[in-house]
Amino acid sequence: MLYQISSLLLEVAAGLLAGTCLLRLYMQYQRIPMSVRSGNPLAKFIFALTDWLVLPLRRVIPAVGRWDLASLVGAFLIQLAQFLILWGLTGMGANLLSVLVLAAFGLVRMAISGMTGLVIIYAILSWVQTQSVAADFLERLVMPLLIPIRRVVPLVGGIDLSPLVLLVILQIAGIVLGNVQAAVLVAL
């Protein structure tokens, strides 16, 4: 019971911090303005949660093009810390390489889950036709993935099914990721 509670608390804390680092990475890649003056509804929140880790990492890890590698490494380090703590709580039964692999796969799984959440929220907001800063923000995050799908999937009765198709693709990616993770861990 104590392990389950600890695992839950670690997952929530690490998910929030690492997920915010991944959101920062993706927003910078998409060139979404992140200054507080830009009107970005999440800018303060993102900076408050990630600056303590990302800014020191930027001193040693430069960006590559539009990719803020400091945010990516920060998210990975948080995932790694989560799995190292859980590894310690379980008596260090697995080898350390397995912990590194779990952290890497956990990071990819988190990216898939995060995008799934963004697509669901975007789809709900598109039904109510909200013209708000938050809706525009979500559209800028989700649209790069929806545009290629919209080229292939036509409107059906005036309904845009591209968010549904993207959700199915993300679910398939999660299934594939789980199977690849299992195969890699068995090979270790």
Image (tube, rainbow, N blue to C red):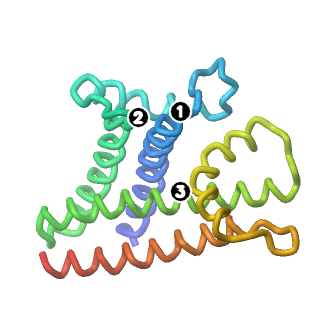
Q: In whole angstroms, how far apart are the C-alphas of marks 2 and 3?
A: 20 Å
Residue that carries the numbered disc 2 in the rendered image: 66
**Which of the pair 48/166 is nearer the observer?**
166
Measured from the top left, where is residue 3 in percent x and y? 35, 68
Measured from the top left, where is residue 108 in percent x and y? 38, 60
User: Which label is found at residue 125?
Assistant: none
**Residue at 66% over, 22% down:** 38
Mark 1: which amino acid? Arg
40 relative to 22, above or below: above
Drawn side of residue 159 relative to residue 122, left or right = right
Classed neighbour count for the residue bearing mark 3: other residues with Cα under 10 Å, few (<14), some (14–19), many (≥20): some
Q: In whole angstroms, how far apart are the C-alphas of marks 1 and 2?
A: 8 Å
Measured from the top left, where is residue 40 in percent x and y? 66, 30
SS of the residue under disc 1? loop
**Residue at 35% over, 43% down:** 72
Quadrant location of the C terminus in the rendered image: bottom left
SS of the residue under disc 3? helix
User: Which label is found at residue 114?
Assistant: 3
Q: In whole angstroms, how far apart are the C-alphas of marks 1 and 3?
A: 18 Å
Q: Which label's residue is closer to the chain start, 1 or 3?
A: 1
Q: Which label's residue is closer to the chain start, 2 or 3?
A: 2
| Whether label 1 touches label 3, CB < 8 Å | no
| Whether label 1 touches label 2, CB < 8 Å | yes
User: Which label is found at residue 31?
Assistant: 1
